[in-house]
Amino acid sequence: MKDVALRAGVSQSTVSYALSGARPISEDVRERIDAAIQELDYAPRAAAQALRGGRSGILAVSLLDHEASHHSWVGFYLMRLTLAARRRGYDLLVSVETAGGADAVREIARAQRADGVVLMSVIRADPRIAAVEKLRFPAVALGQPTDGALAYVDYDFRRAAVVALTRLQDAGHTRVIHLGPRRVEVESGQLYVGRIMEGFREAAAALGITLTEYHPVDDRAVDEAALTDLVEHSGATGLAFSSRLDRAEGLPGKFCALLDADPQRDVVEFGSTGLEGDDASPFPRIVNPIDTTASASIDALVDQLEGRGAVSRLVAPQLVEPLSVTRATSR
């Protein structure tokens, strides 16, 4: 602190007041102290954040415990959120919350361990939302809540379902199987799962498509038997499967192999992340651009912190075709 004071031409107590916010400091002095901090590399992140209003320079991300342990895609989101936070000058604190609770978020807010929080995969009547609103703690939901006025950023699942089924309808299909979210996800109460299911049902009704749904139960033998029966007896010639299903489980591959046995069947991959490696898919993909969603979430939260207010946003899906496309003949 002594070196910063000498470089800025002020006393050590003035530097201390500037960092703590204990006393008002003129803009000219504040700028000189900030410049000295940057030049001397004096705890630059924490100190610079403090100069911008006594903040910690940390943003929190709140996960639900079952979400953190069951989904490999959570890691994709966390990496993108981390990169987006760094671009805005913040570090990321990851907190895992027991589903139905809000103790971890309350502790972060009360102890001022972070300046704000991104709530991932909100559930119906999510107690985390009530907690941050009561504590007036800056927050953004990564997923559209059903209640409250909390700002949110979400992928437009309903629009994505319309794009997926329209793509299959354009290829001549009127009967489609939706290999959707896993049964445990359906039972979790996470809102995005309901929006996926509602989106497909509403789109099918609007387009005149007969839709058959299946939700894997995480028993490979049971799932493969059920999928085989569906393909052989439902009369469906189109399939939309969720990219959230772990390819290593074999279900998408098994299902697609069954469909590929008939050249008049087509597949659409729903919920692809748009990240490197996804472009190897041989199927048309409805892409959820995680980079865009993560960046928009962090931007909305930082905008709150900087007094600009947060604007809710739905991120549009993207249809990406493979190099070659098989179209069904008209029935």
Image (spheres, helix red, strand yellow):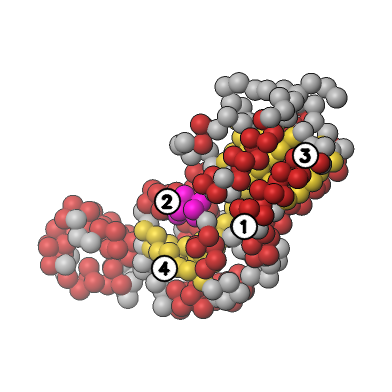
* CA gap, disc 1 and disc 4: 41 Å
Q: Residue 19 in the image: x percent, y percent?
A: 28, 68
The label nearer to you, 2 versus 4, is 2
Which one is nearer the viewer's eye here, 127 or 239?
239
Q: Residue 3 in the image: x percent, y percent?
A: 12, 63
Instruction: Point out which mark residue 114 bears.
Output: 4
Instruction: Point out which mark residue 219 bears.
Output: 1
Residue labelled with disc 3: 232
Which one is nearer the viewer's eye here, 181 or 128?
181
Which residue occupies 69% across, 29% down? Answer: 261
Q: Amino acid at mark 3?
A: Glu
* CA gap, disc 1 and disc 2: 30 Å
* CA gap, disc 3 and disc 4: 54 Å
Total number of numbered discs in the rendering: 4
Residue labelled with disc 2: 79
- Residue at disc 4, secondary structure: loop
Q: Quadrant of the N terminus?
A: bottom left
Above or below, 254 against 63 in this view is above
* CA gap, disc 3 and disc 2: 41 Å
Q: Quadrant of the C terminus?
A: top right
